[in-house]
Image: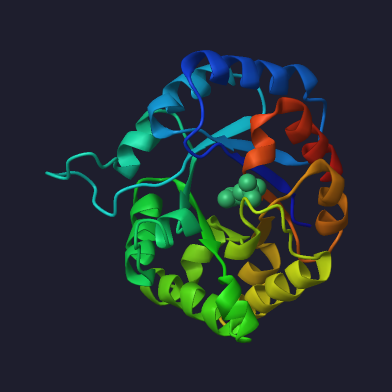
Amino acid sequence: MRRKLVAGNWKMFGSVARNASLVRGLLDGLTDTPAEVAVFPPALYLQQVVGLVAGRPVLVGAQDLSPFAEGAYTGDIAGGMIKDAGARLVLVGHSERRHGHGESDALVAEKFCAAQAAGLTPVLCLGETLAERDADQTEQVLGRQFDAVLNRAGAAAMADAVLAYEPVWAIGTGRTASPEQAEEAHLFLRSRMASHDAMIASSLRILYGGSVKASNAEAIFAKPNVDGGLIGGASLVSGDFLAIIAAAS
Ligand code: PGA
């Protein structure tokens, strides 16, 4: 039985004051839930948020990391630093990194390995663009993005990782994949994993991301291969995020 995970990707939003009030709202409303909850604040606020959630069942993760352990890489943040700040997870390959910062499949694979080397659980984001979906290339793109990491890290590495299927056309657009479209992509990824290791495939959590809201979360989370969500915009309003967590319960 896979435990559902509901993760809030704050992207480049927040301030010391806003983070404090967002986390307070979340913690005040968080009741006993079978789902795991995580938040991904901007790196600068990791320590603050780790402190705010101390003793409560909320995991903290970073949104990106360097592929290198340390060195002369001005502006970059190493996995060891993220771990040192008290975070446990890190996103790799978010489409805003792949497409906005030109991150290649190979670089994403290096980052995935760097995360695990630092003792962090990577949340590997994958997804096709609208042009790729319209050209019927969704599975080809997902397969390529997944294989790049699997070939570099090895199939066993997926035992301590989470996948997030995030169709690029659904991120921040208000246009969500239908539960059926999400299920189809998740099943494809799980089968791909199963061709290497069936045990890992059956325990691998695959989140859906892209315009998840309180109103559509339940139908998406109800699909058998959807193990929770990666939530952007709606995670910045504690009431909305709590409703999505409830939908996963
Ligand atoms: P969204 O973002 O929920 O605002 O569409 C999801 C994500 O980018 O992780």
Q: Nearer the viewer, residue 113 or 218?
A: 218
Name the quarter where the N terminus is drawn: bottom right
Residue drawn where x is 53% and y is 56% of the image: 160
In the rendered image, the vertical position of residue 23 relative to residue 160, given as above or below = above
Name the quarter where the C terminus is drawn: top right
Residue drawn where x is 62% and y is 37% of the image: 38
Picture coordinates of residue 62 (x, y %)? 45, 40
Residue 195 in view of the camera: no
| The quarter of the displayed image where residue 25 is located | top right
Colour convention: rainbow
In the rendered image, the residue lying farthest to the left is 72
Q: Nearer the viewer, residue 172 or 90?
A: 172
Residue drawn where x is 12% and y is 44% of the image: 72
Picture coordinates of residue 101 (x, y %)? 35, 56
Q: Nearer the viewer, residue 225 or 120?
A: 225
In the rendered image, the vertical position of residue 88 relative to residue 51, given as above or below = below
Left or right position of 52 against 32? left
Left or right position of 114 against 74? right
In the rendered image, the vertical position of residue 11 relative to residue 47, given as above or below = below
Q: Nearer the viewer, residue 69 or 106?
A: 106
Picture coordinates of residue 32 (x, y %)? 82, 28
Left or right position of 184 against 80? right
Residue 79 in view of the camera: yes
| Circle count | 0
Picture coordinates of residue 88 (x, y %)? 49, 39
